Image (cartoon, helix red, strand yellow):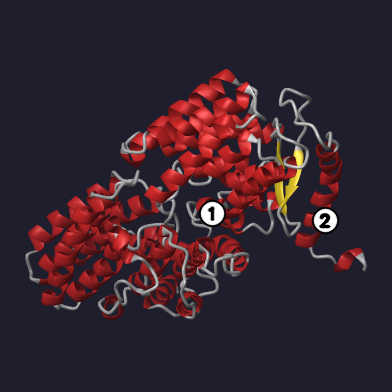
Amino acid sequence: MKLACISKFRLRIVCSALLAIPLLLTSCTKPADDAHDDSAAITDAVVVDDAGRLLGAVRFQTSCTAAAQPHLERGIALLHHMTYLASKRSFLEATMADPECAIAYWGAAMTNVHPLWPDTILPGALVTGQELLDKATIAEHTSPRERGYIDALQAYYRESNQGEPGRLDAFLAGWTNVHESNPDDLEASLFYALALVATAPAGDRTFANQKKAGAIAEHVKAEIPQHPGAHHYIIHAYDSPLLAENALETARHYDDVAPENSHALHMTTHITIRRGLWSESASFNRRAADAATDRLPNGEVSMHYLHALDYLAYAYLQQAQDDEANEVLAEMTSLDAPFQNHAANAYAFAAVPARISLDRHDWSAAAEVKSRWPEGIRWEQYPHLIAIPEFARALGAAKQGDFATAEEAISELTVLQEQAEELDIAYDWGSQVAIQIAAAQAWVAYGQSDIESALERMRQAAEMEANTVKNPVTPGVVLPARELYGDMLLETGSYAKASEEYLAVLARSPNRFYSLFGAGRAAELGGDADAASKYYQLLLDNCPDATDERPQLAHARDFLG
C-alpha cells in the first residue's frame, strides 16, 4: 500500500501504536509466577482493549501477578474513560488470573461509582461493591499504597445511608488522604482530581475545585501525554463557559489517546459545544455513536450510543441542519429494547424530540411531544427527565393559546418537581424543573395578556437558571429560560433589555442559533444597524450547511443585502 493511500486518521493510529511498542514490551517483562512489589521500578504501559484498540497509557504498578497485570492496566484505563462495564470485566478477569489480587477487587468495586454521571448507585450495587471490598481487604497480594486505595473507596461505601452527596464527600476525603500520602502516585492524583470536580460547590463562581483538579490532571498529562484520565478530567474540570478554553487543545487530542473508544470521542464535545463549535461537535459525536452501536453483552443498547446521539442532534440543530437532526431521531426511533438502564439513555429519549421542536420554534410539534417514550425505559426512576417533554408540551400549548393543555402539563410538572426533589442524586434536578414550570407559567400569562406578571415570572426563571450549572449529561437545557425571556422582551418592545438577555445566553452558550438571531433582531429594532449586521452575519456563518431554510436565516440575508 502506498503511504499516500493511508488516511490521516489511520496513519495517526499506526504511528501511535508504533510509539507504544517499547513501553508495551517494558510492561510485559515481569516475572511470570511471583506477585510483584508495587514499589519496584515504575513503568508506563500502553493499553489496548480486548479487540486491540488503543486506550492510552497508564502508570499502574501493582502487587499482583504478571498474569493479572495486563487486566489491571486495561481495567484502570477503561475506568478513567468511564467505560465502566468493560472496566469491571477487566478487573474481574484479573481476579481470575490472581485470586489474591486486592487491587483487582478494589477496581471492580470502583466501577460502581460514577461521580460525574447523572445516575446514582443502586442499593444492589452498594451491596456487591462492599462484598468486593471485603475480598480486597483480606487478599494477600497488596501493599500499603494499595490499601490506601481500598480505604478511600471504603469511605464511599461506608456512607451508604448518607445519600450520594454524603458519599461523594467521603470519597473526596478518602482520595485526599491517598494523594497526600502518595504525592508522586499519578493514578491516585487523578482520582483526587475526579473527586474535586464531583464535589465542587454549584454556587462557587471562583471554580476553586475545578481549577485545582485541572492543574493536577495537566501535571499528569505532562508526565504521561497519552493518559486517558488526564485528558478526561481536564475536560470535566474545565467544562464551564468561563474555563472551557483551557481544555480545548486537550479535548481536540483526546481521540489520539483512544481513537475508537466511544466515550473518549464524545468527551471532546463537552468543550467544543461550550465554544459553539458545532461542526466539530457533530463530527466527534457521530464517530462516538458509531463506536457504540454494538449492543452490550446482555443485549442492551449502550448509554454511550444514545448519549452521543443527543449531543449530535443538538449540534445539528444549532446549525439549522434540521434534516440531519430528524435523521438522528429516526435512528433512535428504530431501536428496539432492551436499553441499558441509565439516565443518559432516558435523557436522550426525553430530550431529542423536545429539542427538535423547541429549537425550531415549532410550537405545534412541541405540544405533541410524547412523554415516557419509549416504553423500554424505566421512567419511574427519572421524574426529572419526564419533565422535559412535559415542558415542551406546556410551552407549545401556551404559545398556541391552548391554555387548558398548558395548565395540565404544568400540573404534571409540579408533581414531577416534587419527585425530583426526593432523588438521591448529587445534582439539583428539582431546580431545573422549577425553571421549566416558571417559564411555562410566564407564557401562559403572556398569552392571557397579563404582560406584567408574565415578564416578572419569566425574569424569575431566567435568574434561577443563571444560578445553576450544566449537568454533564446534557449539552445544554432544551430551551434556555434567558433566551425565552429575551423573546418576551423583544415582543413587548424592550429591545435594549432583550439584547442584554440574548447576549447573556451567548456568553454561556456561544453561537446558539436563536440567541444570535435574537441579538440581531433586537439590535435591528432598536436602531443599531451595525450590531444587527454583526449578529446576523454570525448567524449565517454559524449555518454554512443549513438543510432547512429557516425564516430567521432568510431575514438575516435580506437585512445584509
Decide which of 400, 54 is in the foreground and name it: 54
Query: What's the distance in space between the residues labelled 1 and 2, CA to CA?
Result: 26 Å
| Residue type indicated by callout 1 | Thr
- Depth check, mark 1 against mark 2: the one in front is 2
Q: How many marks?
A: 2
Instruction: Give the structural element (helix, strand or loop) at label 1.
Output: helix
Quadrant of the rendered image containing residue 79:
top right
Indicate the position of residue 183 as horizontal and vertical percent values.
Answer: 60, 21
Q: Is residue 96 above or below residue 152?
A: below
Q: Amino acid at mark 2?
A: Val
Q: Quadrant of the C terminus?
A: bottom left
Q: Residue visible at 41% across and 61% down?
A: 512
With respect to residue 74, does 139 lie above or below? above
Residue 486 location in percent, x, y?
26, 59
Q: Considering only order in the chain, which callout, 2 or 1, is on the residue closer to the N terminus?
A: 2
Up/down of 497 relative to 137, above or below: below
Q: Quadrant of the N terminus?
A: bottom right
Residue 14 shows which numbered tag? Answer: 2
What residue is shown at x 69% (from left), y 32% (from top)? 62
Q: Is residue 57 left or right of residue 533?
A: right
Q: Which residue: 62% across, 52% down?
A: 89
| Residue for badge 1 | 272
Q: Residues within 10 Å of mark 2 (few under 14, many from 20)?
A: few
Q: Position of residue 256 (x, y in %)?
A: 70, 51
Residue contact between numbered discs 1 and 2, judged by CB atoms under 8 Å: no
Q: Would residue 201 be seen by someone viewing this image from the given angle? A: no
Q: Is residue 262 visible?
A: yes
**Rendering coords of residue 473 (x, y %):** 43, 55
